[in-house]
Image: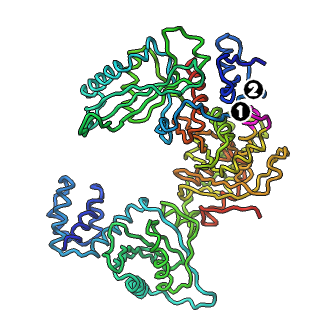
């Protein structure tokens, strides 16, 4: 193992939290059972890492082996990256070929290597016909930088690709090209959809988010349950209030469903719309230009928070379609202009 | 309608600054006179802020800008003297070093080789009656090759009073009124300085929180300020601590558009009224409601930010524009005085 590889191996192992060490090393499957048994995992981390690096040295670990470990670490810590969603399209009328994973990988790698002499590409297959790709970027003259890789998650049975946000913007066009050509698509487009929660992005993009609903209260219609609660809590609520509360609950449920919402952290709206005053006071009446606003909603779980606004009386029900369309449109970045 | 008595020595320049009965001053007076609180009528006014007093050297106050200050209100200092600043520096230095050596407020590897400097900030006042503002800095003495080199500033705090006549009237000669205290630096140092001042001058610090009402006033006043160019967008932050998940709504509007909205709302020249502030905020909220069907008025305004200054409800502010520095401080002094009363 040369110095660079040894350093890469060491730094990758060092990232792994102690609690996950054995799990991740087992998933890596590079060091044998026998070798792992010789290690005392109760040691202090620095000394443990040193021993592990020695074992890797014995087995002549390569850059590719270390890169694979890095992929596994990232799979366990997906939330440390921000993921963008891209959609690929085929030309209309193009044949839908049978997807060949082997051919895709080889083609993808070749395209990148032809363009940049120095690039490291590592693959790891996962379930649902998906593949994780790790790319470390170099140039014609510089070796790949292993510490700023880009991760790509491609679900081969779909036109969707999830790419980790990186500051190396110059690599995106080449990456897009490699993906489209290797997967036999025509175009790739970045969707206005981004989050740390890859599984939520997936759930929304593949419309799987309504499949997790199931509670033991499912048999009781929601309205009845809420009515009971309300009456017990405050018998002074008059009839009209109950009707309105019920309506709000019903409408909210129709829009959001009764299942836990997929997790997004923010939604951003760039508004360029004219000011229209309900109060009829003529404010900004002569102004032709729109108001330029930028609105950003942030929450540990945005959709759950939005769902609770109408029942709390903070928003009207139904909530604005600008907010409720987020899962359907698979977007959380919007540009809104007057028609 | 009562009017505020302007001291005869005030030059005509000062008419352009914050004079007149603000809603807070009115409240103060009624509290002191033990009359029942009269809600502010739409005719309460404060003038818009305009030019800085010529005494303040922009260079000297540049270090106050673009820094985050944590605000406190401070009760009057008993037997504080501007002639004793050197002594205070020595005593405070000794106190800090002693406390840190006791291990009460030490961070690992913290440098105990420090020195405290008291200095006056000339011109940082509203009227001549306001006491001089003064500055306290903790500097690190280490790595100094010679005595002439200034050490690195570790902590800064300054005490000021801008248009504090309401408070000045009520206290005797022995007291120095500097109700507004601003601190920048480690919390532990702020606590140490606070303890020493409290012991030495029998005064009391209180964190100054800024409620939504005052944040709205600030947003309106600062939007009203004439600027040659804007360095930041006008931004509001609302917090919705509802349900299982909290939600933050950041609403930024292009500063020119905010100004256009304000100009359309604003009627009386040179003054800002409660009605105008309310209308300005209502317009922003209704524009928002039109798009999102959310009632911002039912949520909590926690932060406002403009090219003049930004303020957070937790009492942290940043002043970005030296032209309106005195104006911003005057409003904050008012809030501090109100909290003391």
Q: Is residue A258 left or right of residue A42?
A: right
What residue lies at 51% left-to-right and 61% top-to-bottom? A195
Q: Is residue B276 left or right of residue B148?
A: right
Q: Chain of mark 1?
A: A
Q: Position of residue A61 (x, y in %)?
A: 22, 74
The residue under the point 52% across, 19% down is B131
Task: From the viewer's side, name the closer residue of B300 and A171.
Answer: A171
Q: Are marks 1 and 2 in contact (CB under 8 Å)?
A: no
The quarter of the picture where the C terminus of chain A appears is: bottom right
- Please report the residue visible at 43 percent of the width from the left and 17 percent of the height from the top: B82
Secondary structure beneath label 2: loop
| Front position among marks 1 and 2 | 2
Quadrant, the N terminus of chain A: bottom left
**Residues in magenta, as a range:** B267-278
- A256 and B60: which is toward the camera: B60
Look at the image and tell me whether residue A228 can be seen: no
Q: Position of residue B22 (x, y in %)?
A: 69, 25
The residue drawn where x is 41% and y is 18% is B198
Which residue position holds label 1? A235
| Above or below A122: residue B128 | above
Can you say whether B66 is above or below A99 in the image?
A: above
Query: How many residues crowd around disc 2 within 10 Å: few (fewer than 14), some, or many (20 or more)?
Result: some
Looking at the image, how many numbered discs can be counted on the residues? Answer: 2
Mark 2, chain letter? B
Quadrant of the rendered image containing residue A125:
bottom left
Residue B185, how many percent across, how many down? 40, 36
Q: Quadrant of residue A233?
A: top right
Left or right of residue B225: residue A140: left
């Amino acid at each position: 193992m040369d110095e660079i590889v040894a350093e890469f191996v060491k730094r990758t192992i060092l990232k792994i939290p102690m609690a996950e060490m054995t799990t991740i090393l087992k998933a890596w499957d590079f060091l044998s059972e026998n070798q792992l048994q010789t290690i005392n995992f109760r040691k202090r981390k620095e000394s443990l890492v040193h021993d592990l690096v020695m074992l890797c040295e014995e087995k002549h670990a390569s850059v590719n082996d270390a890169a694979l470990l890095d992929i596994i670490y990232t799979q366990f810590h997906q939330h440390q990256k921000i993921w963008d969603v891209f959609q690929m399209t085929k030309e209309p009328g193009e044949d839908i070929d049978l997807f060949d994973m082997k051919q895709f990988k080889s083609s993808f790698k070749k395209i990148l290597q032809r363009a940049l002499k120095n690039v490291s590409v590592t693959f790891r297959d996962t379930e649902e016909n998906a593949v994780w790709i790790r790319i470390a970027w170099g140039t014609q003259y510089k070796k790949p930088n292993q510490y700023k890789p880009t991760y790509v998650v491609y679900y081969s049975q779909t036109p969707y690709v999830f790419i980790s946000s990186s500051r190396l913007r110059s690599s995106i066009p080449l990456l897009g090209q490699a993906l489209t050509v290797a997967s036999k698509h025509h175009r790739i487009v970045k969707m206005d959809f981004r989050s740390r929660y890859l599984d939520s992005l997936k759930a929304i993009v593949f419309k799987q988010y309504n499949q997790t609903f199931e509670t033991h209260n499912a048999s009781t219609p929601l309205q009845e349950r809420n009515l009971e609660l309300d009456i017990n809590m405050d018998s002074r609520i008059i009839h009209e209030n109950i009707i309105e509360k019920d309506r709000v609950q019903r409408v909210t449920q129709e829009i959001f469903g009764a299942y836990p919402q997929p997790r997004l952290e923010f939604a951003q709206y760039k508004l360029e719309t004219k000011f229209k005053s309900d109060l009829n006071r003529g404010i900004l009446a002569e102004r032709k230009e729109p108001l330029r606003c930028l609105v950003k909603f942030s929450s540990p779980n945005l959709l759950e928070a939005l769902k609770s606004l109408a029942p709390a009386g903070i928003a009207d029900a139904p909530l604005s379609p600008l907010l409720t369309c987020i899962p359907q449109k698979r977007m959380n970045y919007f540009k809104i202009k007057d028609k | 309608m009562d009017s505020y008595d302007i001291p005869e020595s005030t030059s005509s320049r000062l008419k352009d600054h914050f004079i007149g009965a603000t809603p807070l001053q009115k409240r103060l007076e009624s509290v002191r006179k033990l009359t029942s609180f009269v809600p502010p009528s739409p005719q309460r006014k404060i003038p818009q802020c305009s030019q800085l007093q010529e005494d303040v050297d922009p260079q000297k106050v540049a270090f106050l800008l673009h820094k985050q200050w944590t605000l406190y209100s401070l009760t009057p200092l008993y037997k504080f003297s501007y002639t004793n600043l050197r002594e205070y520096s020595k005593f405070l230095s000794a106190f800090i070093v002693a406390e840190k050596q006791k291990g009460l407020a030490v961070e690992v590897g913290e440098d105990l080789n420090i020195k405290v400097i008291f200095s006056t900030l000339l011109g940082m006042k509203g009227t001549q009656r306001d006491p001089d503002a003064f500055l306290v800095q903790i500097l690190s003495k280490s790595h100094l090759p010679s005595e002439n080199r200034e050490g690195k500033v570790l902590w800064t705090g300054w005490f000021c009073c801008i248009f504090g006549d309401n408070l000045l009237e009520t206290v005797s000669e022995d007291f120095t009124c500097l109700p507004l205290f601003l601190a920048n630096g480690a919390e532990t140092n702020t606590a140490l300085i606070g303890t020493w001042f409290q012991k030495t001058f029998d005064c009391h610090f209180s964190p100054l929180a800024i409620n939504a009402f005052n944040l709205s006033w600030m947003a309106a006043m600062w939007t009203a300020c004439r600027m040659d160019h804007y360095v930041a967008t006008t931004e509001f932050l609302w917090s919705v601590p509802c349900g299982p998940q909290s939600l933050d709504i950041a609403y930024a509007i292009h500063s020119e558009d905010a100004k256009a909205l304000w100009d359309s709302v604003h009627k009386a020249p040179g003054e800002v009224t409660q009605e105008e502030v309310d209308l300005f905020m209502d317009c922003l909220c209704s524009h928002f409601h039109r798009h999102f069907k959310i009632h911002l008025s039912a949520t909590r305004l926690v932060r406002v930010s403009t090219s003049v200054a930004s303020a957070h409800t937790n009492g942290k502010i940043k002043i970005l524009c030296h032209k309106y520095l005195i104006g911003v401080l005057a409003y904050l002094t008012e809030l501090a005085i109100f909290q003391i009363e």
